Every structure is written in C-alpha cells, then in structure tokens.
Image (cartoon, rainbow, N blue to C red):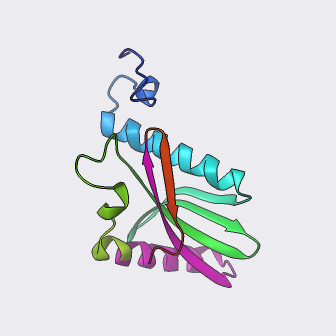
Amino acid sequence: RPPRSTLFPYTPLFRSGTAPHLALGAWGERVAERRYRRDGYRVLARNWRCPSGEIDLILERGGLVVFSEVKTRSSTAFGWPAEAVDRRRQARLRAAAATWIRSTGAQAGEVRFDVVSVLPGRVERLEGAF
C-alpha cells in the first residue's frame, strides 16, 4: 500500500492491481455523491452502464432526475476537469440517459445533466451543464 498523502486523499483506496486513475475517479464519485446527498438528492444508480456508455450518478430530487458526469483530476495542469466533457461525450450521456429512462420505465418529468468537477479540496457542480 502506498503511503498516505495529504495532497492525494484517494491514495488509501489503492489495492494491488488498481490503477491510480481508477482510484482517483472512484474517490471523486464518492465526493460528488456525498455533496448531492447533503443537498437533498436521492441516488437512483451509480456507474450505470449500457451500450451507449456509462452514467456516473443518477439522482432524483422532487421529481427532477439528474444525470451527473463526474470528472476528477489531481490538479488543473491539464485544464479544469469539466472541460473534458466535450460534445461527443455529451451525446453519449444523452443517449445513455434515454436508455436508462426507457429501461427503468421511469416517469422523468424534468431531466437535467450536470457535470461535477472534483479536485483535492474543491468540488464544483455545474447544474444544467448541457
């Protein structure tokens, strides 16, 4: 097990054979989920997969269904995390969301797509990002 670090709080998640970027991503998703729960959202699904792609978090609050893409980085050296959600990724998320709605029979009245940027010590949620 690698030593603990104050700069990288996800390091305790490393297991033999776990890639560092996967541990970082899992840590960021947990951080984002805690923030949503704190704000009154209920988690409907995590890491939901279909042929169109994967949705990190699917949440609900007051009839609103939120499809959330979580992007985690250890620094902004390569830009802000949310910048990684380009038009192609947005299209895949929309297609996956439509598949989730059809497959669950959910009565999604209002739908929103969020992007959550997670950096050590900072979380920013862009509601209605696209």
103 magenta-colored:
yes
The part of the chain drawn in magenta is 91-119
Q: Position of residue 30 (x, y in %)?
A: 55, 44
Q: Is residue 68 left or right of residue 93?
A: right
For the point 70% across and 60% down, the residue is 41
Vertical relation: 93 (above or below) 16 = below
Vertical relation: 121 (above or below) 99 = above
For the point 68% across and 85% down, the residue is 109
For the point 59% across and 50% down, the residue is 33
Q: Position of residue 26 (x, y in %)?
A: 46, 42
Report which quarter residue 1 is drawn in.
Answer: top left
For the point 27% across and 54% down, the residue is 79
Q: Position of residue 66 (x, y in %)?
A: 59, 70
Report which quarter residue 61 is drawn in.
Answer: bottom right
Q: Position of residue 98 (x, y in %)?
A: 51, 80
52 magenta-colored:
no
Quarter of the image containing the C terminus? bottom left
Q: Is residue 91 left or right of residue 128?
A: left
